């Protein structure tokens, strides 16, 4: 099995050494780029493929945000996670990086544990999305479905359903990302009662999936289900997702929040809203969300 390939970009050799040492015990192949222009040359090489990029924010030859924008222009890297490392931690600077696609942030100086946790979370999230993308192509015959109600209980069932429903949409890749994020939120935070702080710590301790599976089987939670109502009209597709939890402060998570940029979680709803849906509306205490995709607006080719 080939190793996970990571590109580390920094104009300071000392910082590159810190990255290498922090990730030394993990089964990664790390390619070093000593600046922005060298990083772009690496990603543009014929046949090159990196599963994640660790990118310095401020470099003299080419600013990190410009490097990020040009990396994301490459179709091979549209969904590759980028971890931005920076000493520029002002909220507006973090927000600029989040908008550009750096959904993971580390402020220098950082601990090896923090780097490993963020890189691990980024790779795990990307793996989920790649798996869903491949499955979203398997359900072409469902194009004739106009309305349906589904029930799921576990993250595995949610992944299967999000892939199925995404196959109905004009852009299956974006739709599966958004639907899966909303279903993960409904299962783990809604029905299983895992709080934001608990998930943050579980991801840092590499215990998130084990705790999810434990709660999925526990008497307290195993009978809870997430309901998904799908409807297609001439102008839109709508998905209404309802869970049996106590709700949450959903308004805090509709946008990319700089104060959460350094956590390994907390981007899913904002990511779904920005990249998957034309409308995303929570109601009540936050355990019901309606997501809509327009069938009338033009989309990029």
Image: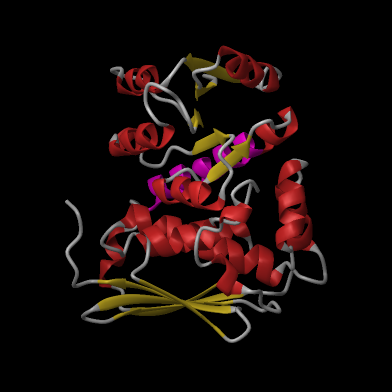
Residue at the image position 53 percent from the left and 36 percent from the top: 83
Residue at the image position 42 percent from the left and 23 percent from the top: 60
Using residue 275 as the reference point, say whether residue 158 is left or right of it.
right
Residue 61 position within the rendered picture, expressed as x and y whole percent measured from the top left: 38, 21
Residue 38 located within the stretch drawn in magenta: no
Residue 88 position within the rendered picture, expressed as x and y whole percent measured from the top left: 55, 39
With respect to residue 193, does 117 lie above or below?
Answer: above
Q: Nearer the viewer, residue 98 or 93?
A: 93
Q: Nearer the viewer, residue 277 or 230?
A: 277
Q: What range is drawn magenta here?
A: 118-136
Residue at the image position 71 percent from the left and 51 percent from the top: 200
Residue 135 located within the stretch drawn in magenta: yes
Residue 195 position within the rendered picture, expressed as x and y whole percent measured from the top left: 73, 64
Q: Residue furthest right?
A: 219
Using residue 207 as the reference point, say whether residue 283 is left or right of it.
left
Q: Which secondary structure type mostly characterizes the magenta part of the structure?
A: helix
């Amino acid at each position: 099995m080939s190793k996970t390939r990571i590109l580390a970009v920094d104009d300071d050799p000392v910082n590159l050494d810190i990255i290498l040492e922090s990730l030394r015990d993990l089964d990664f192949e790390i390619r070093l780029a000593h600046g922005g222009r060298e990083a772009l040359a690496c990603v543009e090489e014929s046949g090159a493929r990196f599963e994640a990029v660790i990118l310095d924010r401020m470099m003299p030859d080419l600013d990190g945000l410009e490097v990020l924008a040009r990396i994301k222009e490459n179709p091979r890297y549209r969904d590759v996670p980028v971890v931005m490392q920076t000493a520029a931690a002002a909220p507006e600077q973090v927000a600029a990086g989040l908008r550009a696609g750096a959904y993971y942030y580390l402020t220098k100086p950082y601990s090896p544990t923090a780097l490993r946790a963020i890189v691990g979370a980024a790779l795990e999230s990307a793996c989920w999305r790649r798996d869903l993308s491949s499955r979203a192509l398997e359900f072409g015959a469902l194009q004739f479905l106009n309305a349906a109600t589904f029930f799921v209980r576990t993250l595995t069932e949610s992944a299967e359903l999000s892939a199925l429903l995404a196959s109905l949409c004009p852009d299956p890749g974006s739709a599966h990302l958004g639907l899966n994020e909303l279903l993960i939120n409904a299962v783990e935070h809604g029905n299983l009662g895992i709080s934001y702080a608990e998930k943050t710590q579980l991801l840092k301790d590499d215990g998130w999936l084990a705790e999810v599976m434990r709660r999925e089987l526990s008497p307290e939670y195993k009978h809870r289900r997430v309901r998904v109502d799908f409807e297609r009209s001439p102008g839109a597709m709508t998905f209404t997702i309802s869970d049996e939890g106590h709700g949450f402060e959903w308004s805090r998570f509709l946008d990319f929040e700089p104060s959460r940029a350094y956590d390994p979680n907390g981007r899913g709803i904002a990511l779904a809203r920005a990249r998957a849906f034309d409308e995303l509306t929570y109601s009540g205490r936050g355990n019901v969300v309606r997501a809509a995709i327009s069938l009338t607006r033009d989309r990029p080719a």
